Amino acid sequence: MKLNKSKELFLEAQKHIPGGVNSPVRAFKNIDGNPIFFQAAKGPYLTDADGNQFIDYIGSWGPMILGHSNPIILNAIKSQLELGTSYGAPTAIETDLAALIKSQYNIDKLRMVNSGTEATMSCIRVARGATQRDKIVKFTGCYHGHVDSLLVKAGSGVSTFGLPDSPGIPASLAEHTASLEYNNIEEINDFMQTHGESVAAIIVEPIAGNMGYIPGHDDFLLALRTACDKYGSILIFDEVMSGFRVALGGAQQLYGITPDLTAFGKVIGGGLPVGAFGGKAELMNMLAPEGPIYQAGTLSGNPLAMAAGSALLNELIKENPYRSLEIMANQLLTGMAEIFQSKSIPFVYGASGGMFGFFIAEEMPANFEDVSKTDSELFKRVYLGCLEEGVYFAPSKFEAGFISTTHVERVIDETLAKVSKGLERL
Ligand SMILES: *Cc1c(COP(=O)(O)O)cnc(C)c1O
């Protein structure tokens, strides 16, 4: 496969943009590849600047759950476009999107923001403001955006570069954040027994997607709920990735656990930049202008983004595609397992709705350390083999995969044929 144009564009981009990308994972550093520059997308397919076609299993990291360029979403954006792009003032459509989200979650009030990072950052502020405590507990390998307080042992792009922390975050701030082991009940219980009274919030990805795909264990998530109730801490579910991805009601629906605050992003914007956070009225009413906790955004609730998000959520609520997404994901993964097995490469996998993951490992990892121990070199070679055949998986063993309703049986079969050829290259 020729990537001439992508290579040229990457060189040019590096002159103007740090590392040539606006988000680090896109640089393909982890797999020593050249990032691919795209120019169009339709259904499950991406077309790059050289005209190569790829079957996409990233789906813009989640939002493309109905496939790329879905006409219903494009039309919703076009209709709003005729009416203007932004007013910096209230519109009915913000309420529509808030009501759509609320219809599927145990949430009283929501506020719109422009990214997942803003959503988790705002949750942390509400939790600290409401409890008048400073300490935050997170879990190693969970990524909650590039929020100062949360960029402590975060997974994803951060792990990819081997930097557990980032310069630019004051030690005096990071010291308020404890990062514990994911799925380790004993550790969180011990920690809370000592520090519970000063913990403002526990934040968690209930189904982690930023250290690869690792579902939280039922009893672990339940232990978090119990600990927060016992010590008066706020439980924050970061469902930026899992919200409307694993089920309409997100991971909290699958586990039957209601957090105090939830952060959203990705899917709810239908491919435009949106985040949101919400929860109990008593917490959300503490936000300005109703209460003293400040939070704001010039483009928050942007009408184009609200139109795209509402169109997508309406469609998802109508179709409830999660069961069939999971069936197709499993079809892909069982097919891949056979191919890997024939090459004597260990392969484990899992899927929840339209989110999935696989590891080159004997056993499904339960935490970040488990994933770190899996074979990075083999992952890289497998990845590049598949890419060469036109299968676009996430370019790191610390990322999840995403499937859309346009990944029908024919596309899965096409993928498996390509994966098989890709592995022949090893
Ligand atoms: C993507 C992601 C974020 C950050 O969202 P951005 O829109 O990239 O700021 C936060 N939390 C989780 C779980 C995510 O997957």
Image (cartoon, grey):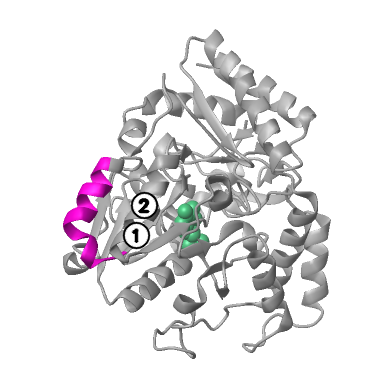
Disc number for residue 224: 2
Looking at this view, is 222 or 290 the one in front?
Answer: 222
Which picture quadrant has residue 214? Answer: top left
Q: Residue at 51%, 81% (x, y): give it.
A: 297
Q: Please, what secondary structure does the residue beneath circle 1 have?
A: helix
Q: Residue at 54%, 49% (x, y): give it.
A: 256
Range of residues picked out in magenta: 186-200
Image coordinates of residue 391 in percent, x first then y, are 63, 32
269 vs 316, left or right, is: left
Q: Residues within 10 Å of mark 1 (few under 14, many from 20)?
A: many
Looking at this view, is 21 or 50 the one in front?
Answer: 21
Image coordinates of residue 370 in percent, x first then y, are 33, 31
Instruction: Name the residue at the front extreme.
Output: 230
99 vs 8, left or right, is: right
Disc number for residue 228: 1
Whether 85 is drawn above or below 222: the answer is: below
Q: Is residue 225 visible in the rendered structure shown here?
A: yes
Give amino acid for label 1.
Cys
- The reply to whether callout 2 and callout 1 are in contact (CB within 8 Å) is yes
Q: Real-space Cα distance between discs 2 and 1?
A: 6 Å
Q: Main secondary structure of the magenta part?
A: helix
Whether 4 is drawn above or below 327: the answer is: below
115 vs 200, left or right, is: right
Q: Residue at 80%, 67% (x, y): give it.
A: 76
Residue 196 covered by magenta stretch: yes
